[in-house]
Image: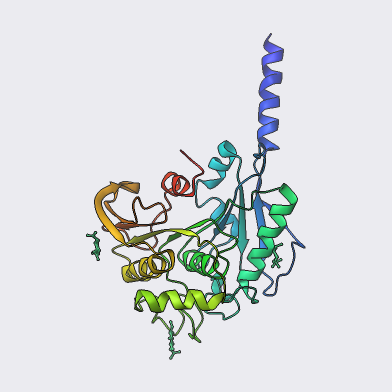
Amino acid sequence: MKFSSTAVNLLASASWVLGASLQQVSNFGTNPTSIQMYIYVPDKVATKPPIIVALHPCGGSATEWYSGTKLPSYANSRGFIVIYPQTTHYSNCWDVNNAGSLTHGGAGDAQGIISMVNYTLSKYGGDGTKVYVMGASSGAMMTNVMVGSYPDVFEAGAAYSGTAFACFAGSKGDPTPFGSNQTCAQGLQHTPEQWAQFVYNAYPGYTGRRPRMQVIHGLADTLVRPQCGYEQLKQWSAVLGVSSTKNVTGASVPEGSAYTQMVYGDDGSKLVGYFGQGVGHFAPPNEPVMLRFFGLLS
Ligand SMILES: *[C@@H]1O[C@H](CO)[C@@H](O)[C@H](O)[C@H]1NC(C)=O
Ligand SMILES: *[C@@H]1O[C@H](CO)[C@@H](O)[C@H](O)[C@H]1NC(C)=O
Ligand SMILES: *[C@@H]1O[C@H](CO)[C@@H](O)[C@H](O)[C@H]1NC(C)=O
């Protein structure tokens, strides 16, 4: 009796040790900027698994972002796969000012990321209608880039403290918090129609559905100003054809902060913003709110 319960414990700890972990993948396809691919495939992967691309902030890495959110633990219970792309260029910031990434089928980090999605869809029989992208700071800027350049790939995105699609276009400085050109991050403004035009120009002739967007920003952010969050809402409201219907204070209270929820359209299912009082850079990811928006959690 005693022996068998020890054996069971040993077995349990062995399977914990041998359980799913973050893995690097090489040779995943076209990769013009030589970025790296990491992936988390849970032990119990769903049939036709949804896929989330999780983009690290500036200075980050796949390993750091793997432990930076609770997505792996939700992957364990929900069976989805998480891709962790990694860049080591520009102080580990994404190339959000690169014309290639701002163009459908162009080169740049964006194309390498799409290769990772293609690889994962084919290797694990993923559900091509359930591919999502999220990120914080530079990763949130790149989230906007991905949904703008590849509306045919992503069902929805969540951007924590980022900037609108093409906000950095034309900036010759590095797209980093130390770069010479901070025009975008300090709150560059355009009309909704101008912002939308950048998105249309990225993929001329595209008339299919557009990714839904969740925009989260701290109101005390001085690195990437809160205005950058409002500019994203202007852009996607024009692209998605939804307008502001209500603002709800105290609707969501992650990490003890007071957030105002900005609802677009009937119910915010296409576009919704969350702006946190006293929240700096970057707003901490709220996995349940994000996964419910994606439709991966009820
Ligand atoms: C990804 O797959 C799509 C559909 O098969 C294909 O059109 C596209 O060229 C692929 N992109 C990359 C970067 O591999
Ligand atoms: C700075 O970046 C903005 C886009 O964020 C661009 O419109 C502007 O031309 C750039 N300025 C310089 C001097 O490069
Ligand atoms: C919500 O707040 C924003 C920013 O203050 C404002 O522009 C918008 O009109 C508000 N929406 C509604 C429906 O009151």
The reply to whether residue 167 is visible in this rendering is: no
Q: Residue at x 42, y 49 (%)?
A: 286
The picture places residue 195, in percent across and down from the top left corner, at 41, 76
The picture places residue 109, in percent across and down from the top left corner, at 62, 71
Viewer-nearest residue: 10 or 21: 21
Q: Residue at x 60, y 44 (%)?
A: 80
| Vertical arrangement, residue 285 with respect to residue 172, above or below | above
Quarter-wise, where is residue 191 in the image? bottom left
| Vertical arrangement, residue 30 with respect to residue 24, above or below | below
Quarter-wise, where is residue 75 in the image? top right
Q: What colour scheme governs how the chains and residues are painted in the rendered image of this protein?
A: rainbow
| Vertical arrangement, residue 162 with respect to residue 131, above or below | below
- Outermost residue, top side: 1
Q: Residue at x 54, y 68 (%)?
A: 207
Viewer-nearest residue: 205 or 172: 205
Q: Residue at x 58, y 50 (%)?
A: 130
Tally the marks: 0
Viewer-nearest residue: 130 or 65: 130
Quadrant (top left/top right/bottom left/bottom right) for the N terminus: top right
| Vertical arrangement, residue 203 with respect to residue 78, above or below | below
The picture places residue 213, in percent across and down from the top left corner, at 44, 59
The picture places residue 26, in percent across and down from the top left corner, at 75, 61
- Outermost residue, right side: 27
Ligand 2 image position (quadrant): bottom left
